[in-house]
Image: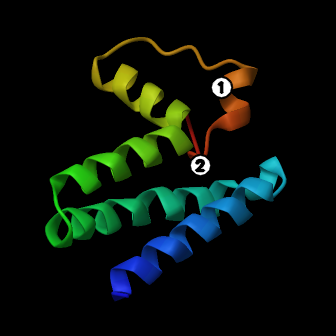
């Protein structure tokens, strides 16, 4: 078992624990996990192959769908209306 395997398993277990936290306490750990996913997926792509990296990207997007919807809408220049349902599941700290 490679170190990347254990890092990936630890990320998945940490995401499970963060998902069980109350909504007010998910912000910082959720952001840390979302940022940590990028180098893990890049390393996965380098060591295992692009198909596994693509599956990793799909898994991370499924964990944080509202963040990526909001980022995509802002990137396109849309005026984003964030209601209570979106805020409830966002993990982005600070001003929206």
**Residue at image location 62% in from the left, 38% down from the top:** 90
Q: How is the image coloured?
A: rainbow
**Residue at image location 72% in from the left, 65% down from the top:** 17
Can you say whether 93 is above or below 45 in the image? above
Q: Tell whether 45 sits left or right of 3.
A: left
Q: Are marks 2 and 1 in contact (CB under 8 Å)?
A: no
Q: Position of residue 39 (x, y in %)?
A: 30, 67
Residue found at the far right of this picture: 22
Instruction: Tell me if mark 2 has few (under 14), some (14-19) or many (20+) residues whose alpha carbon lies within 10 angstroms of its own.
Output: few
CA gap, disc 2 and disc 1: 13 Å
Of labels 2 and 1, the one closer to you: 1
Query: What SS does tag 2 mark?
Result: loop
Can you say whether 70 is above or below 77 in the image? below
Can you say whether 48 is above or below 59 in the image? below
Return the residue at label 2. 93
Query: What SS does tag 1 mark?
Result: helix
Residue 27's disc number:
none
**Residue at image location 33% in from the left, 87% down from the top:** 2
Q: Position of residue 68 (x, y in %)?
A: 43, 34
Can you say whether 36 is above or below 88 in the image? below
| Front-lying residue, 14 or 72 | 14
Q: Quadrant of the N terminus?
A: bottom left
| Front-lying residue, 12 or 26 | 12
**Residue at image location 51% in from the left, 62% down from the top:** 33
| Front-lying residue, 17 or 4 | 4
Q: Tell whether 5 sits left or right of 93.
A: left
Q: Quadrant of the C terminus?
A: top right
Q: Earlier in the sequence, mark 2 or mark 1?
A: 1
Residue found at the far front of this picture: 1
Instruction: Tell me if mark 1 has few (under 14), some (14-19) or many (20+) residues whose alpha carbon lies within 10 angstroms of its own.
Output: few
Q: Position of residue 55 (x, y in %)?
A: 34, 47
Return the residue at label 1. 86
């Amino acid at each position: 078992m490679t170190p990347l395997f254990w890092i990936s398993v630890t990320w998945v277990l940490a995401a499970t624990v963060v998902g069980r936290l109350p909504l007010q306490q998910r912000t910082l750990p959720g952001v840390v996990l979302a940022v940590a996913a990028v180098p893990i997926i890049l390393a996965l792509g380098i060591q295992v192959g692009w198909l596994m990296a693509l599956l990793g990207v799909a898994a991370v997007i499924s964990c944080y769908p509202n963040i990526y919807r909001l980022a995509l809408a802002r990137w396109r220049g849309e005026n984003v209306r964030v209601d209570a349902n979106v805020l409830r599941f966002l993990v982005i700290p600070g001003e929206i």
